[in-house]
Amino acid sequence: MLSNAKGTIRSKIMELGRRIVTQSGKWMVARTTDQQDLTQLLRHLHPVVPPQGLRRLGPASDGGYLVPNDLEGITACFSPGVGELSGFELDCAELGMRAHLADASVESAQFADDRLDFIPKFVRAIQDDQSVTLDEWVATTEPDVTDDLLLQIDIEGDEWGVFLGASSSLLKRFRIIVVELHDLQRLFDANAFPLLRLALDKILENHVCVHIHPNNCAPAVTFGNTTLPDVAEFTFLRNDRIDLGSATYATRFPHPLDVDSTTWNPPMALPGSLYRTS
C-alpha cells in the first residue's frame, strides 16, 4: 500500500487532521482525541531509568542528545536529517561506530571526516529519486542482521511516516533509538491520533522510553488537563538491555545533562503528562 501512495505519510496525517483556521491564524482541532486513549498512550511513553545511566553525545546545544551509556558493541549509527550539525555522529565515530548520515537539504556533513558516510538523500516512507527508505538504506550499508545499531532521527515531521513504513525486524536491530518527534499537538486530534499511535506502538513493540527532553523551539499546547510540547526528543532502549520487571520510572526532569534547544526562548519544563511524578 505504501508503494502506491502519492505522498509521504506525513502529508496523509496532515490531511486526516481536519482543522478550522480562526481569524487569529491558529489551528483548531475539529474533534479531540478520547482522553482515556491519550492518557493510556502517554503512560506507555513515561521514561524508565536505564541501569547504565545516561550520557550526552554531540554538542551541549541543539544537535546533542542523551543516550543510555550502553554503547559498547554497537557497530553503526544511522542519522537521517543531520542538517548542518554532525557533532552527534562524530562522537559515535569516535566510539568506533560506522556513521551513516543522510540529508538532501545540505551538500555534505558538517565535518570533513572519512568516518562519516554521507548521502544527499531524504529518508522517508517511500523511495524516489531524492529519497530512500530506512529499510533500504540500512540493508545496503549494514547488511549483517546480527549487528546492533543506533538510530538518531530528526527529519522535521517525516519521522512518523518512516516508523510506519519501517519493518519491525529492522527497528529491532536498533539497540538505541533517539527521535525528535514533531507535531505532538496532533495527538489531540482524533483524526490524526490513530496513525500517530500506530507509529509509536511500532517503536514500543521492542523498546522502552528512557528519556524525554522537550524542545523549547515552540510553545507547549494544552487541551483539557493534558499539556504536550509540540516538539520533543525521545530516547528509547531495546527491551533486552533492561530488566523491565525491576525498572523504576524517572521522576526528575530535566536531567543534569539536558540543554535547551534554543537560546531565544525560555526553558521549557517537561509536562507532567509525560512522566511519573511520584
Image: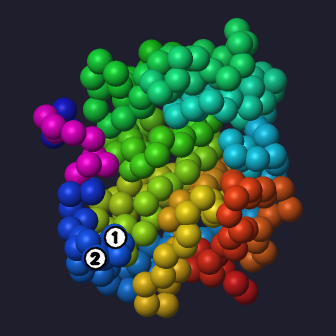
Residue stretch rendered in magenta on the structure: 4-12
Q: What is the x, y in percent for residue 209?
A: 61, 60
Q: Residue at x 28, y 76 (%)?
A: 22
Q: Outermost residue, bottom direction? A: 225
Q: Nearest the camera: 39 or 222?
A: 222
Q: Residue furthest top?
A: 114
183 vs 208, left or right, is left
Residue shown at 54% from the left, 60% from the top: 231
Residue 71 in view of the camera: yes
SS at badge 2: loop
200 displayed left or right of 142: left
Q: Is residue 244 left or right of residue 90?
A: left
Q: CA distance from mark 1 to mark 2?
A: 5 Å
Quarter the C terminus occupies: bottom right
Give the quadrant of the N terminus: top left
User: Residue 181: where, in percent of width, then height?
Assistant: 50, 55
* Label 1–label 2 contact, CB within 8 A: yes
State the residue in front, 107 or 229: 107
Residue topped by disc 2: 22
Q: Position of residue 233 (x, y in %)?
A: 61, 55
Residue 133 sits in quarter: top left
Q: Amino acid at mark 2?
A: Thr
Q: Up-down: is 259 above or below 103?
A: below
Q: Is residue 11 magenta?
A: yes
Within 10 Å of disc 1 (Cα), the crowding (few <14, some 14-19, many 20+) is few
Position of residue 62 in the picture relative to residue 21 (left or right): right
The residue identified by callout 1 is 25
Q: Quadrant of residue 58?
A: top right
Residue 85 colored in magenta in the image: no
